């Protein structure tokens, strides 16, 4: 007769090991998330004309615009530069998140973890 384990199912020891591994992975993910949230990243466009600083929570912390880029007759260009820098900064955070998840999950795609 098969050895009864977790919930009366055979192989209960394996289930316990799996639960321990899941708990360890959760702890590692929490630590990685906290490390990411404390990071600050910078994205620059237009040869440094517009620079955006963002943290790991995807919160913009600073925007720097070089004075020579401010042209009252071409506001659209400045808007495009700011938009591009913000999007680039967000993508940087998302790339780091994806890289961390890949390390933690061994490449498995587990939705909703980050």
Image: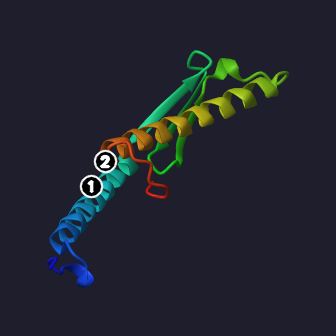
User: In the shown orientation, is residue 36 left or right of residue 66?
Assistant: left
Q: Residue at x 69, y 20 (%)?
A: 69
Front position among marks 1 and 2: 2
Do callouts 1 and 2 mark residues in contact (Cβ within 8 Å)?
A: yes
Compare marks 1 and 2 and give the one earlier in the sequence.
Answer: 1
From the top left corner, tell me how far across and down residue 39 is, in percent: 37, 43
Q: Residue 63: x, y in percent?
A: 57, 36
Q: Residue furthest top?
A: 47
Q: In the depicted view, which residue is nearer to us: 75 or 110?
A: 110
Residue 28 lies left or right of residue 69; in this view the side is left
Circle 1 SS class: helix
Q: Residue furthest right?
A: 73
Disc 2 crowd rating (10 Å Cα; few below 14, some 14-19, many 20+) is some
| Closer to us: 48 or 41 | 41
Residue at position x 32%, y 55% from top? 29
Q: Using a 10 Å C-alpha cutoff, classify the residue at mark 1 as few (fewer than 14 neighbours), some (14 to 19) or many (20 or more).
A: few
Q: How many dots with numbers?
A: 2
Location of residue 11 (image quadrant): bottom left
In this view, 39 is above or below 80: below
Q: Is 17 above or below relative to 65?
A: below
Marking on residue 72: none
The residue that label 2 is drawn on is: 104
Q: Nearer the viewer, residue 13 or 56?
A: 13
Q: Quadrant of the N terminus?
A: bottom left
Residue with the mark numbered 1: 28
Relative side of 29 to 13, left or right? right
Where in the figure is residue 7, as x and y percent of width and height?
26, 83
């Amino acid at each position: 007769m098969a050895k009864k384990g977790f919930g009366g199912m055979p192989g209960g020891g394996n289930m316990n090991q799996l639960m321990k591994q899941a708990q360890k992975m959760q702890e590692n993910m929490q630590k990685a998330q906290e490390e990411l949230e404390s990071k600050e990243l910078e994205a620059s466009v237009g040869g440094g004309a517009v620079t955006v600083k963002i943290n790991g929570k995807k919160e913009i912390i600073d925007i720097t615009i070089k004075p020579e880029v401010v042209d009252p007759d071409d506001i659209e260009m400045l808007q495009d530069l700011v938009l591009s820098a913000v999007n680039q900064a967000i993508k940087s955070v998302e790339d780091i998140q994806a890289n961390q998840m890949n390390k933690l999950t061994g490449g498995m795609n587990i939705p909703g973890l980050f």
